[in-house]
Amino acid sequence: MLDIQNRMPTVSYKGQSMPESPIRKLVPFAEKAYKENKTVYHLNIGQPDIKSPVGAMDAVAHHSLEILAYTRSEGSEPYRQKIAGYYQRNNIMVEADDIIVTTGGSEALLFAMGSIADAGDEIIIPEPFYANYNGFAVASGVKIVPVISKIENNFALPPIAEFEKLITPRTKAILICNPGNPTGYLYSKEEISKLAAIVKKHDLFLVADEVYREFTYDGLKHYSILEEEGMDKYGIIIDSVSKRYSMCGARIGCLVSKNKEVISTALKFAQARLSPPTFAQIASEAALETPQEYFDAVIEEYVDRRDTLIRLLQEIPGVKVGHPKGAFYCIAELPIDNSDDFARWLLESFDLDGETVMVAPAAGFYSTPGVGTNQIRIAYVLKKESLVRAVHILKAALEQYRG
């Protein structure tokens, strides 16, 4: 007789293979810390404390809609026209038909992977990289092939020869984040040109996650892959309003390409999910009118935070830290063996006068096993006074943890 009482359905192998977010997996421990009346300084997540543009908020508050209806699957025509205008002002010559509005940059990445790669195909990515690339790859059945960039040279582009070694018949694309999350590295025009040359040589796509394009420092400028000559067939930009306008909750991004086959294919994925959210598009369209003064003030603030954070981290014995050229993250290497254990210990077992910090273990930003286990990612999205206090707590924690 069959024993059906103890039988149960099982979840998919794909589901079992989905990695936990190194940014969010510690949330239960942070919530426990709150219940113990601890103050937690969040250095773990890229949620800016900068106010969203007033115009974007007002556009939603004072809307005149009587029906909250679907928009077009590729996003509303007026919004895409204005996005195209934004890119043209930034020397990226695209039209509205080259743009698909997505539910965040995350969906744009999923659409891109679904449009250019089949199950078992490969995408080369310099690591460390945005942790959710691992999840998107698993969801798409794509294999990530990492090429390691190192803290010793500030996570600069690895030699092109290292990319060439990894190209196989299954390779479909190279994916970069520029400026980089989690490193803050900004690729130079020369580095982008090298990547453009290799994808043309091997008939690959170059996918660039450019969501932090506005945040570049020390007089440096962002150079887009679609500013590079001859990239119309090869280039795919991933973008988002989340960080640019401090509108993470809007969940509006876009996929941009001059390759018509890529756009028509991605549109089928967009049609399957019907349309991006209407109110969020209204807010995002209004955000495009944000004056340059807003970004000037934000960049000045982030430079001050970056300089303060890096200086204080460098004063801690045994800590090595990269120097960000853009975005608002850095990777710090700590004098410990296991940053996952340390990050959990910070929340569960440590406080300094009732305060502790939450960091993102950096191993989750790599796909190579065993790499980054002594590193953390820090998002400098807190006010300078909070950053100063957080690093003071981190220093005390390291002394106690190591002891």
Image: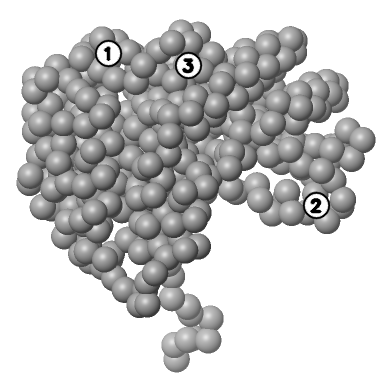
Alpha carbons under labels 3 and 1: distance apart: 15 Å
Q: Residues within 10 Å of mark 1 (few under 14, many from 20)?
A: some
Residue drawn at (35%, 77%) of the image: 67
Alpha carbons under labels 2 and 3: distance apart: 35 Å
User: Quick check: can you spot residue 96?
Assistant: yes
Camera-near label (2 vs 1) is 1
What residue did someone put label 2 on? 34
**Residue 381 locus on image (x, y percent):** 61, 33
Q: Quadrant of the N terminus?
A: bottom left
Of the residues under marks 2 and 1, which one precedes in the sequence? 2
Residue type indicated by callout 3 = Tyr
Of the residues under marks 3 and 1, which one precedes in the sequence? 1
Q: Secondary structure at mark 3?
A: loop
Q: Secondary structure at mark 1?
A: helix
**Residue 325 locus on image (x, y percent):** 47, 16
User: Quick check: can you spot residue 22?
Assistant: no
What residue did someone put label 1 on? 189
Cβ–Cβ below 8 Å for labels 2 and 3? no
Apparent side of residue 282 relative to residue 299 in the rendered image (left or right): left
Cβ–Cβ below 8 Å for labels 2 and 1? no
Task: Tell me: residue 350, above or below residue 128.
Answer: below
Quarter of the image where one finds residue 73: bottom left
Q: How is the image coloured?
A: one colour
What residue did someone put label 3 on? 217
Residue drawn at (33%, 34%) of the image: 209
Camera-near label (3 vs 1) is 3
